Each structure stands twice: as structure tokens, then as C-alpha cells.
């Protein structure tokens, strides 16, 4: 059975959000009716999604479902053709660029781990720690015990303390993933967007990454995109399944994975 | 003092060697040229002083290019434009110093304006009889052009090869403009026949020796500024922009501002280099804007070692020394040799002379005493 995206139900939260503006102001991230096309291809189609403060949400969906494009829209890399993207109750993200959005408190980990390869591990984290980001601020910045204390903390959390002096380019794939998560933490964002944190990891590393994210979620809102269903089960959070640029199903992992349409397009029979 | 600490704090061993050698050259070369009689084995010839003085200004230009290319990934194929603009600013001062001693003996107008039948000095030339004003323009004109150019280019996120092509177009457009007589900068003849600078005869050997020393000092100052920038936290951000521009943006850094800053600083350095070049070679004409010049500068930096600063300066010296020798020995062969050199370096020394040497040195040190080198690393700052 093929599914017509136009038949899709708008998630109930979003409907409530529209009817009662109070909910809008209380949600941390609010996407409503967002669409974007690339050369006629609708990558995101009338997408609505609400993330509450302190919530961790897992996003699943087949390739081309629009997961990464959604992150691009939230972080300002892509401008939506239509729709609202509201952060922290009132800030319209569609009007801002990547830098401004990052400084508002939205951190992003890329699908392919992206760290500064010719810098040491600790320098990578140091650059990410919340501090003066202006040219002249960094040009004349002096050694700050406060920042380096934070670097030590972060390196402890992501278990890279023993590798702090190595070049980030020399790290293993899994270590790079962690370093990037550490850099996200160092930014101290309100919302973390984490794209495939467990990709290319061993089972042990995957388990450790799930624990790390659960730990982070205690104090931050987190959106995780993942394909690894075992990993998502370990996270134990609400799941949204995207398909052809809109929400196909939403709820607990058990509910979503029992959904006929999810099985049809993503999980397979 | 704050500034001293800012400039000298992060100099490494190679940097100190570089500075000491340059310092010695700045003092010894003029002495050996002026005080030691020509017959002596220690005498430095007038030709050598002129030649190496010119190389020093090239080295400063290479340093400026390395700052943007080596550390921020901006491959500029138009830095010759900033060099030439600085040169023209100096040339205009020198033209005004000629005064009534020109061929047409006009009290204010340079010869070419009299020849073009102009009646008064165009506004672009106003103030250039004042040395401080001219020196201000040496930095300001390239600086403002770079700032405006960079403002638009970096904000519109023009990067990579597209930016390189635009920089190339910039210098080419300026070349065509300066070729025009009605631009008022001497057309294709440019500015020449200089008489004196600050009252000193520009032909006298003492003046030339002083110009040599000033070029060396400018190179040292340029190195200190560039080194302070690249070793600061802002320097780490520049390298981050070079290696992963999008990531830097998502960390909350305004990438375009960092690029604009380093681009403008680099253009000013190139302008100063040009200003020191012109009185030593005695002429500035539109061919200095030629795209080939800017590309040659890239070769110097690549040969010496991109992203090493010292290497860029060294590369400028080595390649130009080879050029002087080659154009004497095999006048037709130079361009082939230059092309061959670039191919050789790209294939076999991708990190350039200094980069390759540093790597070899580190590997050797690590092989010889692995525990010691590990222990030498200090714990967290």
C-alpha cells in the first residue's frame, strides 16, 4: 500500500499548539506547517513537530525522509519555503543564520563526525566552550582557568581525558563522535540536535553513547536522529517517525513500531 | 607591556632563529656594504643589497599570502593588487618629491600630466607630497579595498575556487584601469624617475642600504604580527574555518568576520611590502597588477611551506634567488623551471620546504627518544 502524504494526520500536539497559543510559548521548539523543496523535490512537506523543554526525542525514518533537512531548517542552514519555526516560545528561527541560532543555544552534531582535525582534542573543546566569540575578543583573549576547568569536565564526561593532547584527526571514528558531542556540551546549548551519534560504532560504544545521551538529557533538551533501533530502545524516549518529509507516526517506541505504516515504509515486515 | 607580550609570547624556536638571522642581516648587510671596501671578501655588493632588499619585500608579501591561505584557507590569486596599490601610494609620494626637477620643470605636476596637457593635480593626488599622508595611504588604500571586497565576498559566502577567480579578476581589472592614461597614474609607463625620499637621494648607496634594513625590519614586524594572530585563540578559529567552515559556524563563530579581519590585515601587510619595493626598484607600473605576479606569490608560499609563516618568507627568497640566477643563465628557461618547481613541490613536498623539514625533524626526535618526547609535553595549561 502506498501512502499519500496528504492523508497524513497532523500530530495532536501541534493542533493543540495552534488552538492554544500558551502551549506555543511553553514549547522549546515548535515547527508548524514547514515545507521546503529542492528543484521541485519536496524534502519537507507540511512538517509539524513540538519539543518540550527538557524533553529527549528520537527521530527515525527511511533514507530521504527529511531528517537531516529538518535539522538544517532548525539550525538555519536551509530556509523553509513556508511554515513557522519557533524556538523558546517566541524566537523565529527562519529569520536567523547559523551563527545566531548557535548562539541562541541550539547545538548540532553532524551525521558525519566533524571535528577540527588539525587541532588537539582539548583545543577542539576549548573553542566550543561558551565564551566571547568576537574576533577581537578571541584575538586578545588570555588563558582562562575557568574555561580550561570546563574543558577538563567535558573531557571527563566524554571519556577523552587521556587523549586530550592528540590531534583530533588521529582519533578513531567513535572517539570523534564523542568529541563532537563533547563540543556540543561545551557550548551549553538549550537544545542539542544529534544526527546519528551511534553510526559506525561498536556495540559497546553504542551502549556507552546511549548512556552519555541519557545523562545529557537530564539537563538539556535533545533531539536524536538514529537508524539503530536497539540504540533507540536503550534511550527509552518518545519516537517520531518521518516519511517523505512529514510525521508518519509518533509515540512510544512500541506504539510506533507497531504502526502498520511505519512497518510498511521503514521497519519492513 | 601588553603589546610586547602579545607579539613575543608565542614565538617558537624556528621563529627566533628567523628573527635573529633577519636582525643580523638588517645590521650587518649595510655595514658590510658601506664600510667594507669593495675589494674585501666580506664586501656585500650594491647589486646584492638591491636584490635582497627586493626579496625582503617579496617575503613580506608571501607572509601576507600565507596568513590568509595557509591559516584561513583563502587562496588569493590577487594579492599582487594590494602590493601594487601600496607601491603606487609610495610612488605618488616619490613623484611629488621630484617637484620642478622633472623634464618639463613644472612646479607641481608630474611629467606625464604635463605631457597629457593637464592643468592641475587630480584630487587623487592631493596630499601625497606629505610623507605621513602617503604612508597612511599605503596601508589605508589596500586595507579599504580588501575590507569592501571581503565584506561582500565573505558575507555572500563565496569560497574556494570561486573566490580565487574573483580575486584574480580584481587584480586584472585594476591592471586594465591603471593602464588607462586618464586614470591619472601614469598609464602604462607608471611612475618612475624618482629623485629622493624624505630629502635623501634615492640613488645613493646609503639610502639604498637603509631601505634594505627597513625592508628587513618590516618583514620582522610582519612576522611578529602574523605569528601573534595565528597563535592566539582567534588563530585557532582561523584554522577551524580553513578545515571545517560549517562546523565553526554551528559553534557560534561569525566566520565572515574572522575572514574579513585576517584578509584586511593581510592586504595592509601586502601594501606595506609594495611601498618598500617601489623605492628600491625605482619604478611602479600596471604590470605589477598582472595576475601572473599574484600566482607566482602562491608558488613561493607553496615551495616554502604553506601555513608555516617562516616557510613563506623562505620560499620567496629561494624562488626569487633561483629566478635571478636562472634568468641570467638560461633566459628562456625560467618559466619552465618555475612550472617544474611547482609540479615538483606539489608532488614530492606537499608541505613545502619548512613543512617537510619540520615533519622529518619531529619523526626523528620521536624515534630517537619516544619517552622523553612524551614526557616533555606539559600537563594541561
Image (cartoon, rainbow, N blue to C red):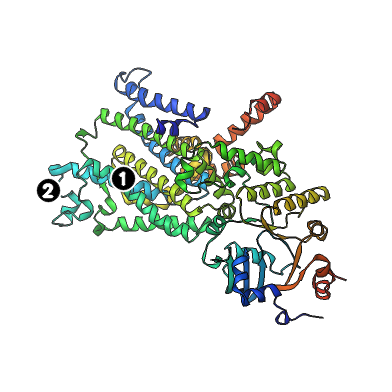
The foreground one among B298 and A208 is A208
Q: Chain of mark 2?
A: B
The foreground one among A129 and A203 is A129
Q: Residues within 10 Å of mark 1 (few under 14, many from 20)?
A: many
Q: Which residue is mark 2?
A: B106
Q: Chain of mark 1?
A: B
Q: What's the CA distance linking mark 2 and mark 1? A: 26 Å
Residue at image position (65%, 66%) is A70
Residue A220 figure quarter = bottom right
Q: Report x, y in % for residue B326.
A: 45, 37
Q: Earlier in the sequence, mark 2 or mark 1?
A: 2
| Quadrant location of the C terminus of chain A in the rendered image | bottom right
Residue A110 figure quarter = bottom right
Residue at image position (58%, 66%) is A89
Q: Report x, y in % for residue B44.
A: 35, 24
Q: Which residue is mark 1?
A: B138
Q: Is residue B66 visible?
A: no
Tell if the residue under mark 2 belongs to the same chain as the one under mark 1.
Answer: yes
Residue at image position (15%, 57%) is B118
Direction from residue B91 to residue B257 in the image, left or right: right
Q: Report x, y in % for residue B159.
A: 52, 57
Looking at the rendered structure, the number of numbered marks drawn on it comes to 2
Of circles 2 and 1, which is in front?
1
Amino acid at each position: 500500500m502506498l501512502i499519500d502524504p496528504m492523508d497524513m494526520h497532523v500530530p495532536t500536539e501541534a493542533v493543540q499548539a495552534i488552538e492554544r497559543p500558551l502551549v506555543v510559548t511553553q514549547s522549546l521548539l515548535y515547527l508548524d506547517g514547514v515545507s521546503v523543496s529542492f528543484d521541485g523535490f519536496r524534502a519537507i512537506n507540511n512538517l509539524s513537530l513540538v519539543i518540550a523543554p527538557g524533553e529527549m526525542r528520537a527521530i527515525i525514518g527511511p533514507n530521504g525522509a527529511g531528517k537531516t533537512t529538518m535539522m538544517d531548517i532548525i539550525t538555519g542552514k536551509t530556509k523553509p519555503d513556508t511554515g513557522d519555526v519557533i524556538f523558546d516560545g517566541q524566537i523565529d528561527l527562519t529569520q536567523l543564520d547559523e551563527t545566531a541560532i548557535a548562539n541562541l543555544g541550539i547545538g548540532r552534531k553532524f551525521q558525519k563526525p566533524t571535528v577540527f582535525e588539525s587541532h588537539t582534542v582539548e583545543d577542539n573543546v576549548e573553542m566550543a566552550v561558551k565564551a566571547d566569540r568576537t574576533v577581537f575578543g578571541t584575538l586578545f583573549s588570555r588563558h582562562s582557568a575557568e574555561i580550561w576547568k570546563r574543558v577538563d569536565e567535558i573531557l571527563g564526561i566524554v571519556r577523552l581525558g587521556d587523549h586530550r593532547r592528540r590531534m583530533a584527526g588521529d582519533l578513531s571514528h567513535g572517539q570523534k563522535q564523542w568529541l563532537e558531542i563533547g563540543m556540543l556540551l561545551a557550548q551549553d546549548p538549550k537544545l542539542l540536535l544529534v544526527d546519528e551519534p551511534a553510526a559506525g560504532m561498536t556495540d559497546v560504544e553504542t551502549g556507552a553513547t546511549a548512556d552519555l545521551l541519557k545523562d545529557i538529557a537530564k539537563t538539556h533538551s535533545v533531539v536524536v536522529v538514529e537508524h539503530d533501533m536497539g540504540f533507540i530502545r536503550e534511550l527509552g524516549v518518545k519516537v517520531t517517525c518521518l516519511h517523505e518529509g512529514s510525521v508518519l507516526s509518533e509515540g512510544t517506541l512500541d506504539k510506533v513500531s507497531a504502526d502498520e505504516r511505519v512497518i510498511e515504509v521503514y521497519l519492513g515486515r | 607591556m601588553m603589546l610586547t607580550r602579545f607579539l613575543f609570547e608565542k614565538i617558537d624556536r624556528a621563529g627566533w632563529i628567523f628573527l635573529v638571522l633577519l636582525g643580523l642581516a638588517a645590521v650587518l648587510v649595510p655595514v658590510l656594504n658601506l664600510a667594507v671596501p669593495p675589494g674585501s671578501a666580506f664586501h656585500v655588493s650594491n647589486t646584492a643589497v638591491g636584490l635582497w632588499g627586493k626579496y625582503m619585500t617579496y617575503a613580506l608579501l608571501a607572509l601576507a599570502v600565507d596568513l590568509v591561505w595557509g591559516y584561513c584557507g583563502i587562496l588569493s590569486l590577487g594579492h599582487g593588487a594590494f602590493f601594487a596599490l601600496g607601491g603606487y601610494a609610495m610612488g605618488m609620494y616619490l613623484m611629488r618629491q621630484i617637484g620642478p626637477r622633472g623634464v618639463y620643470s613644472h612646479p607641481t605636476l608630474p611629467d606625464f600630466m604635463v605631457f597629457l596637457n593637464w592643468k592641475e593635480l587630480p584630487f587623487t593626488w592631493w596630499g601625497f607630497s606629505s610623507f605621513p599622508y602617503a604612508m597612511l595611504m599605503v596601508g589605508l588604500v589596500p586595507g579599504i579595498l580588501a575590507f569592501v571586497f571581503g565584506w561582500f565576498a565573505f558575507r555572500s559566502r563565496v569560497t574556494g575556487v570561486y573566490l580565487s577567480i574573483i580575486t584574480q579578476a580584481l587584480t586584472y581589472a585594476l591592471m586594465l584601469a591603471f593602464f588607462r592614461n586618464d586614470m591619472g597614474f601614469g598609464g602604462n609607463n607608471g611612475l618612475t624617475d624618482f629623485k629622493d625620499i624624505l630629502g635623501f637621494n634615492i640613488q645613493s648607496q646609503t639610502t639604498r642600504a637603509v631601505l634594505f634594513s627597513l625592508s628587513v625590519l618590516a618583514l620582522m614586524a610582519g612576522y611578529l604580527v602574523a605569528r601573534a594572530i595565528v597563535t592566539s585563540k582567534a588563530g585557532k578559529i582561523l584554522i577551524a574555518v580553513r578545515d571545517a567552515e560549517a562546523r565553526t559556524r554551528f559553534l557560534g563563530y561569525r566566520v565572515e568576520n574572522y575572514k574579513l579581519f585576517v584578509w584586511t590585515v593581510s592586504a595592509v601587510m601586502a601594501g606595506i611590502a609594495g611601498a618598500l619595493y617601489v623605492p628600491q626598484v625605482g619604478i611602479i607600473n600596471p604590470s605589477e597588477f598582472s595576475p601572473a605576479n599574484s600566482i607566482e606569490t602562491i608558488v613561493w608560499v607553496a615551495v616554502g611551506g604553506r601555513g608555516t609563516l617562516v616557510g613563506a618568507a623562505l620560499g620567496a627568497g629561494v624562488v626569487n634567488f633561483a629566478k635571478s640566477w636562472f634568468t641570467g643563465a638560461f633566459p628562456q628557461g625560467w618559466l619552465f623551471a618555475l612550472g617544474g618547481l611547482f609540479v615538483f613541490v606539489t608532488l614530492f613536498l606537499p608541505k613545502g620546504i619548512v613543512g617537510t623539514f619540520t615533519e622529518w625533524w619531529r619523526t626523528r626526535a620521536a624515534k630517537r627518544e619516544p619517552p622523553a618526547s612524551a614526557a616533555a609535553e606539559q600537563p594541561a595549561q
